[in-house]
Image (cartoon, rainbow, N blue to C red):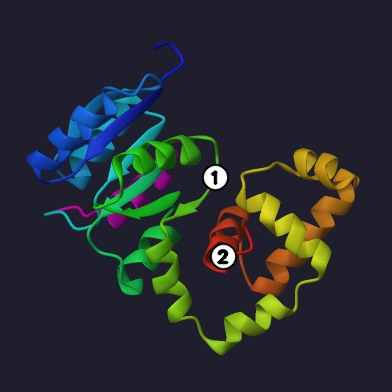
Amino acid sequence: MADAIRVLLVDDHQVVRRGLRTFLEVQDDIEVVGEAADGASGVDRAEELRPDVILMDVKMPGTDGVEALRRLGDLGNPARVLIVTSFTERRTVVPALRAGAAGYVHKDIDPTALAGAIRSVHAGHVLLQSEVADALLAQEGAGENSRAGSLTDREREVLALIARGRSNREIARALVLSEKTVKTHVSNILMKLDLSDRTQAALWAVRHGISD
């Protein structure tokens, strides 16, 4: 288990934590290192245990998942946070993604798919379960669609690779470009989409199906 993905469970329902732990503990490459029942405790445990991935609910008493995400970001905690919740409305999803969540899935996700989601976000990918992405796409405005149309084919290729967690060097190698050219494409993408960083670009790509 030396190379196992170290996971922290943060959910206010003990039965949920127990179910997640029971399933994840049979995975050869995943180790549950701790639990917490609310966001504040989750942040404390994340700082203590330094997990690779945190499975976190959004709606919890006291400090909720979004506030916990913000605190983790302020602390510079490197854990990748996968939201696992019953709430998939845009008004719940968007704040979590903006706060730094690396993925967002519904609690009824197939257990095998959940294990895959953990591996995916750990590898640096941004992941949205299909119904979550559909909920976002259904409410996108014309302005977003207009910005999507402003991207060149090459920029869309670069954006797709950003969404897969690739570095500029890896993108340059994949597309047979110089790193300087890739940096220029990334800058143009952020400017055209009115985004501030690569994480936001990756989330935008997932929401618009550009990461496929």
Residue 130 at x, y percent in the picture = 43, 61
Disc number placed over residue 204 in the picture, else none? 2
Q: CA distance from mark 2 to mark 1?
A: 13 Å
Dot 1: element: loop
Give the residue displayed 41% in from the left and 21% down from the top: 29
Residue wearing tag 1: 125
Residue 190 at x, y percent in the picture = 69, 65
Q: How many marks?
A: 2
Above/below status of 13 relative to 51? below
Residue 12 at x, y percent in the picture = 12, 46
**Residue 134 visible here:** yes
- The crowding category of the residue bearing disc 2, from other C-alpha atoms within 10 Å (few below 14, some 14 to 19, many at least 20), is many
Q: Give the farthest residue toward the bottom.
A: 142
Task: Judge by depth and name the residue closer to the eye, 79 or 25.
Answer: 25
Disc number placed over residue 9 in the picture, else none? none
Task: Judge by depth and name the residue closer to the eye, 71 or 88.
Answer: 88
Give the residue displayed 29% in from the left and 25% down from the top: 48
163 to the left or right of 43? right
Q: What span is colored magenta in the figure?
A: 62-80
Dot 2: element: helix
**Residue 101 visible here:** no
- Residue type marked 1: His
